[in-house]
Image (spheres, rainbow, N blue to C red):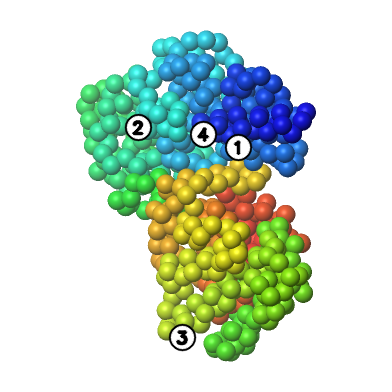
Amino acid sequence: MSNKLLSIALKELHALQEQGSVFKSSDFSGKNMTYLKKAGYLKPIIRGWYHQSHPADMDGDSTAWYAGYWEFVAKYLDERFGSAYCLNPEISLLLHTQNSIIPKQIVVVTKKGAVGRVTLPHNTSLFTYPEKKAFPKESVRVNGLNVYMLEEALCKVGVSFFRDKQEEIEIALGMIKDVSALLHILLTRDRMDDAASRVCGALKFVGRKEDALRIKETYEAVTFKTVSLKNPFLKETALLKPSREHNPYALRLQSMWEKYRAVIISMEIPIPKQKTPFGIEEIAQEMEEKYQADAYHSLSIEGYKVSLELIDKVASGGWNPAQNPEDEATRNALAAKGYHGAFQAVKRSIIVCIDDNKEMTEALRKEHHKWYSELFAPSVQTGILEAQHLAGYRNHQVYLRGSLHVPFPKSAIVDAMETYFDLLAKEEDPIVGAILGHFMFGFIHPYMDGNGRMARFIMNAILVSHGYPWLVIKVEHRDSYMQALESASVDGDVKPFVAFILRCAC
């Protein structure tokens, strides 16, 4: 295959990218698809369907597939069933609540056809089954897919979903302002007695007793059946507090914070405070002593190959690409330069907060953009990155390599970050604030790059401003670190991450 033939194929792929990252073989002309497959720019999904990839992707890398996962499901189902399909109530509810985890199996209800299973890449699959009589009378489009209306999904999911997915149920209920639509579903669908009890019990559980009683009394008056207000969940306390918030992203962050906060408090493993006097000079000195190790390990975790010599050169001001040819702008050198500037900005923020007797958690709302600008200013100044990179939060979707967690879409970032800083400001326990401040920042992933470094800066700013030592996460522990973050993001288990942070602090 000549470079000319591949170049022609890549031009066609570039034009097709305007419609997404998932394609059919019929989208390509001539042998272009074959050339792109051989060069590693396309990977098969099922027969006749492909997703975009990159030649540098390693075998087994799932990132490109997860990036195109929902796009493929939407295009495939639209082509095969048209409007005659709907994702089952469980998956529908997860999409309504904007659950960020890629499900291993999508279950689809169809008006016609046979039961079938389609095997997809990386142990994912799509299962279809016909449901002519119980097919939903109405559906809505979410992320390009036909799903049950939120209220009907809530009524249709079974008791096991309430027990296993309490967080999703609470978020779904929080999204519903008026329960009239719930009552309509319960009164117009068959065999809704158990569903009415689950919904009413859940409403009472989350602090909406008046809404629960309204549904109970109306349902009982019409059907002459008894509705229970029994708690349908396994836990005795709600994750979400009653509020006027109806944004699913904000509700998810609030729910996770309360859930994970309780876990951290229950572990009762304190991080030892500084033995030295708690003063500004001592803090500045301690931070400078930690700088070299922190920069080396933090940058290495992100994949930069930075030597201790380079770090010292940058810190001493000896790195000058304008005057020294050997200091030409490189990715690693610019990362080290940016890290030094950001580290100094973090130090200044901590000192100002302590000197003015202000809470760091509140100052972070204003300071975090400054830290981020310092991280990437050298790359912008040398022309490697465009100036718009420093404008603020990302304006594109991002995907995390090898992770089932998909960060929030760009449209949700501003509101999510407002909620994030509100939660930080309200948190009274600095250990909880530091650990969840770190985790939640990475979970939201507000920037195109630098999120891990920013998350660690935030954690340490909270710790140091409350008299705790600066915590260095070493590159040798990167795999455990990433696995712990994945566990908290995907499995709902924050204990491995908390335990990891505490081990690093001891």
Q: Nearer the viewer, mark 3 or mark 2?
A: 3
Residue shown at 43% from the left, 57% from the top: 417
Of callouts 1 and 2, the N-terminal one: 1
Q: Amino acid at mark 3?
A: Asp
- Front-most of 392 and 504? 392
Q: Nearer the viewer, mark 1 or mark 2?
A: 1
Residue with the mark numbered 2: 151
Left or right of 161 in this view: 12: right
On residue 139, the disc is none
Of callouts 3 and 4, the N-terminal one: 4
On residue 66, the disc is 1
Residue shown at 55% from the left, 46% from the top: 398
- Front-most of 274 and 19? 19
Of callouts 2 and 4, the N-terminal one: 4
Residue with the mark numbered 4: 18
Q: CA distance from mark 3 to mark 4?
A: 52 Å
Label 2 Cα crowd, 10 Å radius (few <14 / some 14-19 / many 20+): many
